[in-house]
Amino acid sequence: MTDALASAEGGLDALTGQGSRGSSGTLRFVAVKLGGAVISLVLVIVLGFFLFRVLPGDPVTTMTRGQPVGARQLAQLRTQLGLDKPLIVQFGQYLWGVLHGDFGTSFTYSQPVWTLVRQALWPTVLLVGTSTILAAALGLWLGSRSAWRRESTMDRTTTGVALTLWSVPQFWLGLILLMVFGVGVGPIPGIFPVQGMVSVDTPSGFFPQALDIAHHMVLPCITLIAAFYAQYLLVMRSSLLEEMHADYLNTARAKGLTDDQVRRRHAVPNALLPTVTLIFLNLGLVVNGAVTVETVFSWPGLGLLLYRALGVPDLPLLQGTFITLAGAVVVMNLIAELLYRVLDPRVRTS
Amino acid sequence: MTDTANPPTAAMGGRRAITWRRRWAAARQVWRTFARSRSGLVGLGILVLIVVLALLAPVLSDAAQLDVTQATGARMAAPSGQDWLGTDESGRSVLVLLWWGSRISLLVGFAAAALCVGIGTVVGLLAAHFGRWVAAILLRVTDFFLVLPSLVLAVALSAALHAGTGTVILAIGLTSWPVTARLVRAQTLTVETRPYIERARALGGGHWHVVLRHVLPAVLPLVLANTTLNVANAIIAESTLAFLGVGDLSSTSWGEMLHAAWTNGAVTAGAWWYLLPPGLAIVVVVLAFTLCGRALESVLTPALRGGGRR
């Protein structure tokens, strides 16, 4: 858990460090960042090939593990997946396919992987997006309050609770919430749906549908928020603590502003900068969380797709979801790095 | 901080003895500072207790109780006088499972953390010491692994390789090292600017000598503090992998228990005695490691600085 913080801080160091060095203009900065992201994407694609084609030895045997399959079917599968060709040719075909949005055909669903991924994309974006925004809002709010009254009982309790929640495995928290509020225990009735995104019997208007989705989303969202608000809280707290003794806050107080105004209008906006990029930098972690939480709540997103593919294992589908998730995180990081430069003028001018 | 001028009498005991006496004094000093942190002591106490219990499991209880065919209890029975924490889906005592499960969870936690810290330290040291293109490549790779969703990568690795405890350790270790690498690199960079490193170089010390004899000892305390935090992360990662069903299904770990509870409908059956204990165990162990790590960090960071200032 502290690792995640360290990683976030490390990432920020890299941002600011590299930003301040690039004095030869925005164009160069953007070019360097773009180049880095492109290299990362290429690495993701190569890794995808290595993990799911080279590492399993014979992918066909891996995929048909524990199933009665004849030699002819195996050979047919091999031809279908192009495994009878030399590795370098396979890589060429794979690369060509990925660049054209063709991730092959799923072994279990007998559908193009890209179709499955595309269908699962928006539920994940909805879930991850909503919970990230809420977790960030909650964390930033609590964090700024904590820092302002540091070492108070309120500060200690908030930080303690956040740290404890952070050491909880997300899937377990999800299971407990599911049992208590989904199924119901003792006197507590199950008030939230236990699985999926929409119930079958919901009328098909926009509002009933949206309401039903929101109803289904409550428990998964709470699970993700509980796990993630801690880091926003801690980073907000520490970055606000750094600003606490700045001269401009004294000036603001000297002008006769109330304590609350000083905090909200002067201190928080400056402390906000590192946290804004943190939101993007942590998307890798949020994706991790989404995989387990979607599995627990059967939320029809990429995480559940990944989980279902794992059981077989459906290697083409695994490959497709891996590349999509990793690629999305790389792109989001690029956006974060560019955004940081726009948001913080100090990086630009120094 | 402790290597103050040696009295002349100490020289008679030989260089080795002096070194050891100095190390011993340093260790005592570290312990004194550590013991000042109450939360650190609590964490350490919990850890020692759990590790001892885990090691003693084969002595104090019978492994046959894990055998599904010899289970005596009813299917998912609530806690009673006989089975304090109830039973699982095949009638085994949850308490016994919990006890034996701690062994795999801790083993994977320690082994994966060791692997991760090992890789991270080597990469961090090399990147900081050699600079230029070595650093450029290593940092690029580190950054790449840093942003990747590590769980997805670990899941992919364990799905591609054969199922087993070794695979899980490998998957966690190989995906969680970048943070350590960054930390070690930053620390190495500060250490390398110190005059004593320059002195070692001026006296003709090669890369190996400087890195192993001078830089590594200065970085090591931080690495150790970082290891405890890594163990905590590895235990959570193990439970997550096991829950997703990519672990070694034949062995009992806390994550495996939760996986079994979930797939056997403990959630719908409201079998809280089956779901709560493994999760709580994970939380307690992870918190204990975190408390220890934080206490160690606060002890060692000023110690590092103090050593340089002398």
Image (spheres, coloured by chain):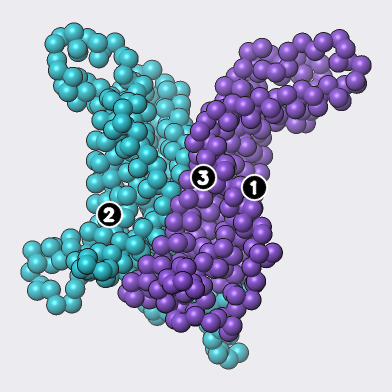
Chain colours: A cyan, B purple
On the image, numbered disc 2 is attached to which residue? A222
Parent chain of label 2: A
- Point 49% across, 69% down: residue: B94
Cα separation, mark 2 vs mark 1, equals: 33 Å
Q: Residue B27 in the image: state x and y as whole percent.
A: 69, 29
Q: Is residue A125 visible?
A: no
Q: Quadrant of residue A60?
A: bottom right
Q: Residues within 10 Å of mark 1 (few under 14, many from 20)?
A: many
Which mark sits nearer the N-terminus, 1 or 3?
A: 1
Q: Foreground residue, A228 or A167? A: A167
Quadrant of the image containing the C terminus of chain A: top left
The residue at which mark 1 appears reads as B114
Same chain for mark 3 and mark 2? The answer is no
Helix, strand or loop for disc 2:
helix
Whole-percent x and y of residue B264? 42, 77
Residue A227, above or below A249: below
Type of amino acid at the residue the image marks with label 1:
Ala
Residue B206 in percent (x, y) is at 79, 26
